[in-house]
Amino acid sequence: MKKSLLTILSAVLSLSAFAQPTPSPDWATLQNTSFTVSAAGTRFLDAVSANDIWAIGYDGFAYNRNYNWFTVSNNGGSTFTTGNCYADTNTYIMANLDAIDGSTAWVSAYMKASGNMGAVHQTTNMGATWTNMTPAGGYTNAASFVNIVTFVTPSTGIIMGDPVGGEFEIWRTTNGGISFTKVPGANIPNPASASEYGTVNVYEKYGANDIWFGTNLNRVYHSVDGGLNWTVSAALTSTIGAAAGIGDIAFSDVNNGIMTAYFGPSTAATITLWNTTNGGASWTQIPTISASYGYNDMCGIPGAPGWYASCSNGASAAVQFLSYSMDNGVTWTDWGSLNIGYLAIDLVNNINGWVGSFSSQVTIGTEGIYKYSGIPLGIKQGDARPLAVSLYPNPTSGIFSINMPAAKEGYAINVYDVTGKQVFSSNGKTAQMETLSYDLSHLGKGIYNINISKGSQVSSQKIIIE
C-alpha cells in the first residue's frame, strides 16, 4: 500500500487531546483553519510566505476516509477560507499539495477506486475553482501512479509518478502548467528493480532548481535543473532489515538535508534518521535519534543551513511535541507544549512558521493551526547566541557593508522582503574578521529582513532601502 509519513504514524485524534492543551510559548498564536467539521486535522501544509498559507484537511476521527478539503490564508493566518478541491470524494485521493503563492496552488492525486493512475489539479483563484491540468496521455497506464506535483518557480515544475515500462514517469513544464513534456527516460536513472516506486508526498524542493524525491527502496533521486535531469543516491542499508521506504525529506539549503528511512517488515518497520552535507549525493545515519525528534512531519528552515523543525502526534502527551535542530538533525530541542497533537509543520524562515493540529471538537471551524510567535530562531533557543555583527549604513541606497567575524565553518546571509520572500542570499567562509560589501540597489525601496548566521549563532536585522 502506498503511504506517506503521516499514514505510518498517528494521524487520528488521541485521547490526550481531550486534556487541557498548553501551547509552547513560542507557538502561542492559535488560528482557525475554518474546516467545516469538528476535529479536522491538517494532512498537508505549505507556507509560501509570511502571508500565504495553504493546507489540506481530513476527519480527525477517521483518517483513512477520503476527503478533499483545502484551506488558504492571505493574511498570515488571521483568517482562512476553505472549500473542496474536487466535486466529490469518490474519484481521487490526494497525494500532495504544492502552493505557488496566495492565489495559485497545485494538488496531485491518484484514483480512489483502482488505487493507481491519477491527476493533477490547479487553482489560480484561491481555490474558488480547480482545473484538471494532467498532461494528455499522462498517468493512464495501469502501472501509473501519481506521487507528487511540485514547482520550483511559478513557471517550472514537475509531476512525478511510478515507473512505467522500466522508467519513472516524470512530466515537466516551463510555462506554469499550460503544457507538460515527458522527461526522457535517458535523463532518469533506472529503478533498482521492478519493485521500486515513489511514495506520495515524500519530496523536497529548494531554490529555483533543486528537487528531491524518495523511493520505497530507500534511494533518493535529485535534480539540479528543475527536473530535467536526475541522479540517484546509493540505496541506504541497515542491520535492522530490508529497506521499507523513505518517510520524509527536508533540506535547509541545497547542501544540508535530513531524511527518515524505514527498515524491516512493512507492518513493523523501524525508523532511522540520516543527514547529508552534499545535496543528497551521500547520506550518513545519525546513530541515535533524539527523543525530541517529531515523527509526524519535519521541514527545513530556509536561510539557516542545518536548521530544521519537527512535530509529533501520538497516543499520549509524551509523544506530542514540537522541536527544532540546529546541527543538521543530530540533536533536537523540545519547544515545550502539552496535550497538543501536531500533524504538519512548515516555516518560511526563522521568523514565520505554522504547525497544523486538530480543529476544535466543540466549535466547528475554530482552532486547528498554531503560528510561530517567538523571537527569531537562534536568538535564544538552545545554545544559540546572538551573532555580533554590524551592518552599515542603514538606511541605505542599497549598498551596505557587514563586519563578519571569523567564520571558518561558513556563514550564510539571507535577505527577505516584507512578505517573507527570499530576495537575496550569499554564503562563504572567513578566516578572520572581514568587511563584506553588498549591493541590493536593484531591489525596490522598503524594509527588508536580513538573517546572518554562523553555526548556531544568528543576527536578525532590518535594513531600509530608500
Image: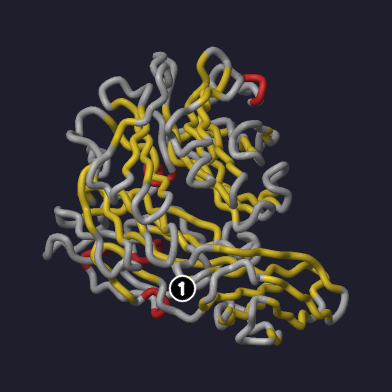
Q: Quadrant of the C terminus?
A: bottom right
Q: What is the crowding at mark 1: few (fewer than 14 residues within 10 Å), some, or many (at least 20)?
A: many
Up the image or down, 284 lies above or below 265; here it is: below
Q: Is residue 247 shown left or right of residue 452?
A: left
Residue holding disc 1: 335
- Residue shown at 54% from the left, 12% from the top: 165
- Nearest the eye: 183 or 217: 183
Give percent across and percent down for residue 278.
Answer: 73, 49
Q: Is residue 31 shown left or right of residue 156?
A: left
* Residue 388 in view here: no
Give percent across and percent down for residue 98.
Answer: 42, 46
- Nearest the eye: 16 or 295: 295
- The amino acid type found where label 1 is placed reads Trp
Up the image or down, 331 lies above or below 45; here it is: below
- Residue shown at 45% from the left, 54% from the top: 297
Determine which quarter of the picture holds residue 378. Answer: bottom right
- Residue shown at 60% from the left, 39% from the top: 226
The chosen color scheme is secondary structure
Give percent across and percent down for residue 15.
Answer: 24, 60
Up the image or down, 247 lies above or below 162; here it is: below
